[in-house]
Image (cartoon, rainbow, N blue to C red):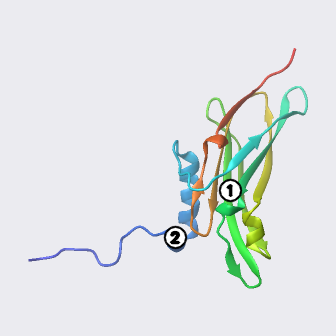
């Protein structure tokens, strides 16, 4: 019997052993995917306010239940991080706006947060038109991700006559 093989280990890396570039690529892939992962519950609300005759301000609020976030003991505080990435596209599929943030949580007792929610807010100034908002949230302890049905929405802004 003769064996032919490559030297080294070629299994896919888990989240703990992936590097920064791999993690960023994973977020981008989930944002571009038509059917991304839904490992963590998240809720989204988007409203709009007219700024002038041709522009609207669209505040976006994401809420993640504290029970969905694994906290790690770090000294005298419990710590966790969430990566949030989002995009706004017009009806033709062109990027109009992007959001990218890492939310770092450091609290005295994670037990209190597990019974509450973590809220992240951002906003976009958009001209009149039809838009598609999409957000992906990843908690950075286990790498669980979400892009739930509530996050994808279309809204048409039009002038009143």
- Residue 142 percent across, percent down from the top left: 57, 68
Across and down, in percent, residue 61 comes to: 77, 48
Q: Nearer the viewer, residue 57 or 121?
A: 121
Give the numbered dot on residue 143. none
Residue 97, relative to residue 120: is it above or below? above
Mark 2, residue position: 18
Where does label 1 land, which residue?
84
The C terminus: image quadrant: top right
In the image, is 17 to the left or to the right of 157? Answer: left
Identify the element where label 2 is drawn: loop
Apparent side of residue 116 relative to residue 1 in the rendered image (left or right): right
Q: Position of residue 26 (x, y in %)?
A: 54, 58
- Which residue does the image show at 89% across and 25% down from the upper left? 53
Q: Earlier in the sequence, mark 2 or mark 1?
A: 2
Which of 99/15 is in front? 15
**Residue at x 53%, y 51% (from the top left corner):** 37
Q: Is residue 23 left or right of residue 80?
A: left
Whether residue 14 is situated above or below residue 29 in the rendered picture: below
Indicate the quadrant containing the N terminus: top left, top right, bottom left or bottom right: bottom left
């Amino acid at each position: 019997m003769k064996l032919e093989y490559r030297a080294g280990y070629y299994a896919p890396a888990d989240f703990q052993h992936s590097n920064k570039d791999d993690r960023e690529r994973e977020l981008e892939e989930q944002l571009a995917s038509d059917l991304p992962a839904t490992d963590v519950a998240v809720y989204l609300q988007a409203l709009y306010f007219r700024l002038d005759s041709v522009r609207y301000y669209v505040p976006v609020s994401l809420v993640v239940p504290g029970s969905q976030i694994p906290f790690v003991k770090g000294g005298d505080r419990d710590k966790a991080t969430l990566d949030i990435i989002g995009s706004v596209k017009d009806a033709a599929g062109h990027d109009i706006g992007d959001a990218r943030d890492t939310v770092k949580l450091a609290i005295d007792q994670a037990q209190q947060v597990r019974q509450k929610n973590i809220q992240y807010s951002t906003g976009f100034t958009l001209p009149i038109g039809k838009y598609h908002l999409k957000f992906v949230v990843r908690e950075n302890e286990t790498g669980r991700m979400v892009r739930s049905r509530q996050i994808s929405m279309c809204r048409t802004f039009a002038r009143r006559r």
